[in-house]
Image (cartoon, coloured by chain):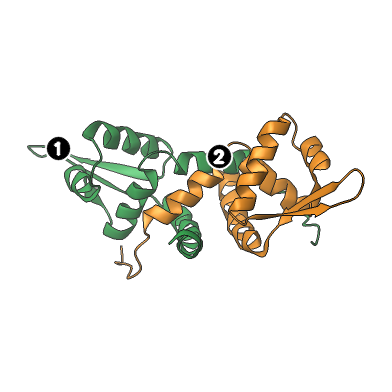
Chain colours: A green, B orange
Amino acid sequence: MVQRSRELNPCPVSTLTNLLSGPWTMYILWVLSNSGPTRFGALKRKIAGISTKMLTERLRMLEQEEILYRHYEPTVPPQVTYGLTEKAKELITILEQLDDLAQRWYG
Amino acid sequence: MVQRSRELNPCPVSTLTNLLSGPWTMYILWVLSNSGPTRFGALKRKIAGISTKMLTERLRMLEQEEILYRHYEPTVPPQVTYGLTEKAKELITILEQLDDLAQRWYG
C-alpha cells in the first residue's frame, strides 16, 4: 500500500456523511436531482411516507447547508420552489459514484 | 436540469451512507487507508479514545461487509492484522472525493 501523501481527515467527512445519513436526506436529494426545481407539495407527493413536518425540517436543514435553495413567489396562494444549488451538484456527482458502488454491493 | 436517464436509487446508497456514518467507521477506514495493514493494538493506539469493545465491534462489522480482511497468525501470543480489501479501495477513492468536498465545506 503506497503511503499517500494527502491524509483523509475524518472530521469534515464525518460531518458530511452524518448529514447525508439523516432521515430522508438522500431521498430528497435524489428526487431534486432527477426532477429539478420542485414545489413543496409535489416534493411531498414524490417522497411517499414523509410527513409535512419532517419534509419542512429536512428542507430547512439542507437550505441552511446551502445544498438546496428555496424560491418564494408572493402569489396567492404563495408558491415555494426548492432546487439544488451549484454546491449540491458537485455532491451529487460523488453520490452517483457511491450509488453505483452501493448498487453493486447491496442492489 | 437535463433529465438524467439513470435514476439515483436512494435505498442501497442509504445503506452505505448509514454504514459509513456509524461511530468511528470513517476514522478506522482513514487509519487503514493511510497506514496499510495494521495490528489490533496499533490500530487502537492510532484511534485515540476508542474502547477495545467498540473497536472489536466495528472491525467485525466491517469484516462482515468485506470492507476489511482479518489475518490471524497462530504465533504465541497470536497476531491479528486488519487491512482494506480490494472492495474497500474502490470505496476509499470515492470517500477521498467526499473528503475533499467536506474539507472545502467544513474544513
Q: In the rendered view, would you say A76 is above or below B72?
A: above
Q: Residue at x 45, y 54 (%)?
A: B13
Q: Percent x, y for residue B66?
A: 62, 57
Residue type at numbered disc 2:
Gly
Q: Residue at x 36, y 59 (%)?
A: B9
Disc on res. B78: none
Residue type at numbered disc 1:
Pro
Residue at the far bottom in the pictured view: B5
Q: Percent x, y for residue B67?
A: 63, 55
Q: In the rendered view, would you say B11 is above or below A55?
A: below
Query: In the picture provided, is A18 more to the left or to the right than B11?
Result: right
Q: Are marks 1 and 2 on the same chain?
A: no
Disc on res. A74: 1
Q: Secondary structure at mark 1?
A: loop
Whole-Å distance between the Cαs marked 1 and 2? 43 Å
Q: Nearer the viewer, residue A67 or A100?
A: A100
Label 1 crowd bin: few (<14), some (14–19), many (20+), radius 10 Å = few
Mark 2 belongs to chain: B
Q: Residue at x 24, y 42 (%)?
A: A49
Q: In the rendered view, would you say A81 is above or below B54?
A: below
Disc on res. B22: 2
Q: Percent x, y for residue B37?
A: 79, 54
